[in-house]
Image (cartoon, helix red, strand yellow):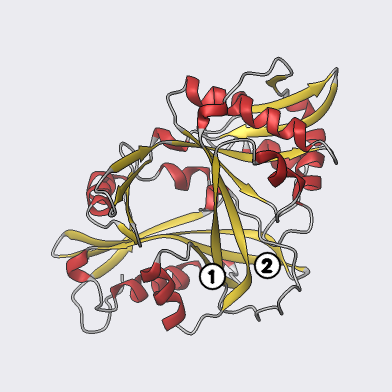
Amino acid sequence: MNEPSGCIHTIREARPSDNDALIKLELRCPLDLGNVELVMDRRPDFFAQTQVQEHSLVLVAEEEGKLVGVVAGAWHDVPLLGDTRHLLYVHHERILPSHQGKGLGRALVMELVARTREAGIHSLYWLIVPSNERSMRFAQSAGIQRWPVAGRLCQMDLAAAAHSPRVRTLERERAGEAASLINVAHGGLELFSPFTGHRLRERLARTDAYTWGDYYGLFDGERLVAVGGLWDQGRSLAFIRRHRRDGSTSFSRAMPVVDYGFTPGAEAAMVEMLQHLAALAVDRGRNELALGLPPPGPLDVLLQGLPHTVDEFCCFIPVIPVPEEGAIKGIHLDPFYL
């Protein structure tokens, strides 16, 4: 246990019995994104996202038996600037408004780092949308330089959803072929760890939230030309957006596309695949499809015909020297770690 200097908070590892209290805490801690206030509703399972991650840790801050803060991180091996790094991603932190500005957020992060040090972490990192000014200020106040490249997240409206007869669930025996297509589509991106058939099978066996029943291939005859998995994040996470300009509220439950890829030049097949996955999302009562995008290219051109938005995530990695502008191709966004 640890107590931030000058405070009476106790920091400990979260327990399953904290589930309801953590959900209530997050509902009281919306993100300020400029014109939008974003609330994340993680009912019924606050811990659902941590279960799809390879390694994760959730810490809570308590005051007189009441939860007043939480931080969650996940660590994984990823390529960065030519070397494989063991990085800790801080993907989630919330502090009750009444306890903000007192150093509790920094204390939680430092305790997270301390408790994962034995895992051989090279550095922690954050991915933050620029409109999240509070988190941007937090990173910059700590003296962490922003990297000169951003990760890109596409959020597709499901109006263009269309089932394709060329798509079917993929047999696990074709995991090696699927891994090759994923690697071609994302090769050269920082934070993208190349797949093998074994690694893909491991990902799809970690939890019942993402299995071979959620993984699809698009075929030209018997030739596999595009692949992609659907993770039903919306089963335990709703995004509630309160729009300040007109006072309206919108809700979304998303299904991210995970571990996708396609043969070189087959961007049109990938779009056909995305439309099919969008149709599956509609069938399951979801209203948004999300996927990380590589740097702008032919896939962006074809996506222009579909209703979608693209958000950029700024990257902060405090220990690794910041590369020069143009020195790296781009950053991969894995939905499991956002």
Q: Which quadrant of the view contains residue 174?
A: top right
Q: Which quadrant of the view contains residue 329?
A: bottom right
Look at the picture and state if 287 lies above or below 323. above
Where residue 68 sits in the image (x, y, percent)? Answer: 22, 62
Element marked by disc 2: strand
Q: Which mark is residue 124?
A: 1
Q: Which mark is residue 239?
A: none
Look at the picture and state if 84 lies above or below 338. below
Q: Residue furthest left?
A: 64
Q: Which amino acid type corresponds to the residue marked 1 in the rendered image? A: Leu
Is residue 212 visible in the rendered image? The answer is no
Q: Considering depth in this image, is 16 or 312 the residue closer to the camera?
A: 312
Where residue 319 sits in the image (x, y, percent)? Answer: 59, 79
Q: Which amino acid type corresponds to the residue marked 2 in the rendered image? A: Arg
Side (left or right) of 286 relative to 76: left
Q: Residues within 10 Å of mark 1 (few under 14, many from 20)?
A: many
Mark positioned earlier in the residue sequence (1 or 2) = 2
The quarter of the rendered structure image containing the N terminus is bottom left
Residue sitting at 42 percent across and 41 percent down? 48
Residue sitting at 17 percent across and 68 percent down? 98
User: Mark 2 = which residue?
Assistant: 85
Q: Considering depth in this image, is 96 or 274 the residue closer to the camera?
A: 274
Element marked by disc 1: strand
Where residue 279 sits in the image (x, y, percent)? Answer: 56, 23
Q: CA distance from mark 1 to mark 2?
A: 10 Å
Where residue 135 sits in the image (x, y, percent)? Answer: 40, 69
Q: Are marks 1 and 2 in contact (CB under 8 Å)?
A: no
Is residue 172 visible in the rendered image? The answer is yes
Q: Residues within 10 Å of mark 2 (few under 14, many from 20)?
A: some
